[in-house]
Image (cartoon, coloured by chain):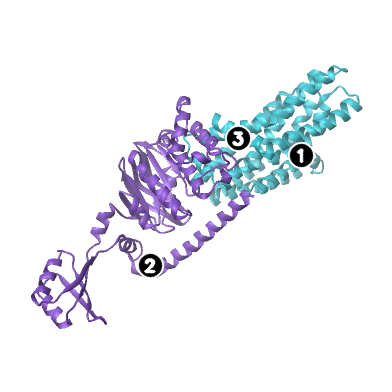
Chain colours: A cyan, B purple
Amino acid sequence: MKAIFSRELDAHFSSLTGNLFCAFVLLFAGIYTMAINLNGSYGNFEFVLSTMSFIFLITIPILTMRVIAEERRQRTDQLLYSLPLSMGKIVLGKYFALLTVLAVPVGIMALYPLVLSMYGNMNLATSYSAVIGFFLLGAALIAIGMFISSLTENQGLAAGFCFVVLLVNYFLPSLAEYMPKTATGSLVALAAAVLVFGVILFFFTKNVVLSATVTVALEAVLFVCYSAFGASFEGLFPNIMKKLSVFDQFNPFVNGVFDVVSVVYFLTVSAVFVYLTVQSLEKRRWS
Amino acid sequence: MLEVKHLTKRYGGYTAVSDLSFSIEKGQIYGFLGPNGAGKSTTMNIITGCLAATEGDVAIDGHDIFEEASEAKKLIGYLPEIPPLYLDMTPRAYLQFVARAKGVEKDAIDGQIENSINVTQIQDVADRQIKNLSKGYKQRVGIAQALIGDPELIILDEPTVGLDPIQIIEIRDLIKSLGKTHTVILSSHILSEVRAICDHILIISKGKMVACDTPENLEKLFAGETVLNLVAEAEEAEVRSALSGIGEIREIKYEKEDDGCAGISIETDGSRDIRRDVFFAFCEIKRPILSMSTTRASLEDVFIELTGNKDEVMENSAAELSEDDNAAKAGEEAKEDESDIQQGT
């Protein structure tokens, strides 16, 4: 795992992507620190992080696009498959290298509140809780990007798809406002979501029986729940949409709360997508 | 060393490898021979654990490639069809990475890297970026990578494809020297190559094993007919009556040539060497033999016999298929070249 980690880290910093990522994040950190902390005279670094969280939409796809797609294109994945290492270790090595790249600009940014506090009043506790939250948000998004990179051997496609996924994710809370809030509305929307899930399942497994059974079972559970607790379906779908937004989980940190639920949320999303990446690579062995 | 039992691999409805079984002994060079699309690469990918088999087992020194993957993989060095190189690294850095990833002991890493650089003779390019190397050197770096970790079994998939003739000779010599200290399996669709390098040949066709033996034995096995070619000064009738006493002769072809000599080809059933009988028969009628030579079934004939003519019905379609394969292969290679150029710029 260490070998994979250090090779990946070298690759990130000897190629454009890693350096570009750090430069971009730091550039925007600088701009917003100047605008909010210096010009706006706010003593809260979390506002900077909140405003700049959107740059993950562009920088994460660029950082993660090549991480597995390129291995497939260059056929170096064959080397990885023939190494006496488990796929889990290989993927973790790659993931930790990505986290290290993320840690570089975040680590530099972590100095800003300290420096600023020398010249004025900074709320250091909330600032640093937000820095940690910002890092965890990035970690979760990187896991998603890495998974998307494992689905294709075209890094452009990986970047584009990742951008779209993150963009939708970013706007999910706003989109949720437009969703029907009635119980029936939620039911219909959820039923449709289950259908979409069924189609995606079929796409990945190519197994009609399995995907049909799972879809029908989920729909049945949904209707049973609806007939049992109809009232709690009120506003359920918009709420779920909000909860699915990884970006939305960063808000508590911005409001000065070190939210353990959000921390667990970020860690869970990271773990799930790292696991899915391993599965996606293992699946290629069987196809 | 390597035990393959009832290996089957299906891609959807297509069976790439069907019920393949063989075992490989230590310290020899094995050639995996078959036309394009016969399932060579698939088999090698399964042996090295890069691909899962639909059915069957692979065991390296008793370690199952799936159940005890890391023990088994430590015994194998693998060069896939396209060498798995990180183009932005130097060969030395690349080998360093491979050594660490293969779990080579820290103290042994430098020694092993130096050794594999020396064996594959890439000293001169060891500190240049891999993307700037020629195809032959890239192939060598690929082989150097397979040698890291000092595996007992080295598996090379089409190691000489796409190289120029001098590079081919160099790589063949390299493989031969590797064969002295390791067990080597290499695949190829080029007969002369396999005959030149290998102690054992496994011929596979349409995913099935059709023969497994030494090159000499394979030739002998199929040397049912031996043809004796003579040039002699004799009339046709004389020749036929003189040779009528030799029972092994099946057919005599006589062709008069312009200079008064005759080209005579004598087909025998191959059960006995009849050259002496022919000589004395010509002596008796006082006709001189100017030259005499024998032609035996070559490995080419064996190969064609085994892979092509096996089912007569399939012959034509198979020929068409392999032509298609060749065309596809050529296309692929052209594409690779293109991408090489792009990477170079």
The residue sitting at 18% across, 78% down in the picture is B233
* A134 relative to A74 in the view: left or right: right
Q: Residue at x 81, y 34 (%)?
A: A28
Evaluate whether label 2 is on the same chain as label 3: no
Q: Which amino acid type is shown beneath numbered disc 3?
A: Glu
Q: Going by the picture, which residue comes out furthest to the front?
A: B259
Mark pair 1, 3: CA separation: 28 Å
Q: Residue at x 52, y 44 (%)?
A: B84
Neighbours of disc 3 within 10 Å: few (<14), some (14-19), many (20+)? many
Q: Name the one closer to the observer, B29 or B126.
A: B126
Q: Is residue B6 positioned above or below A95 on the image? A: below
- Circle 2 sits on which residue? B314
Left or right: residue A88 compared with residue B148: right
Is residue A213 in view? Answer: no
Q: x and y percent of residue B303 in the render?
A: 33, 60
Q: Point out the tag, 1 or 3, that comes first from the N-terminus.
A: 3
Please, what secondary structure does the residue beneath circle 1 have?
Answer: helix
**Mark 3 lies on residue:** A8
Note whether B201 is above or below B237 in the view shown. above
- Residue A170, numbered circle: 1
Q: Label 2: chain?
A: B
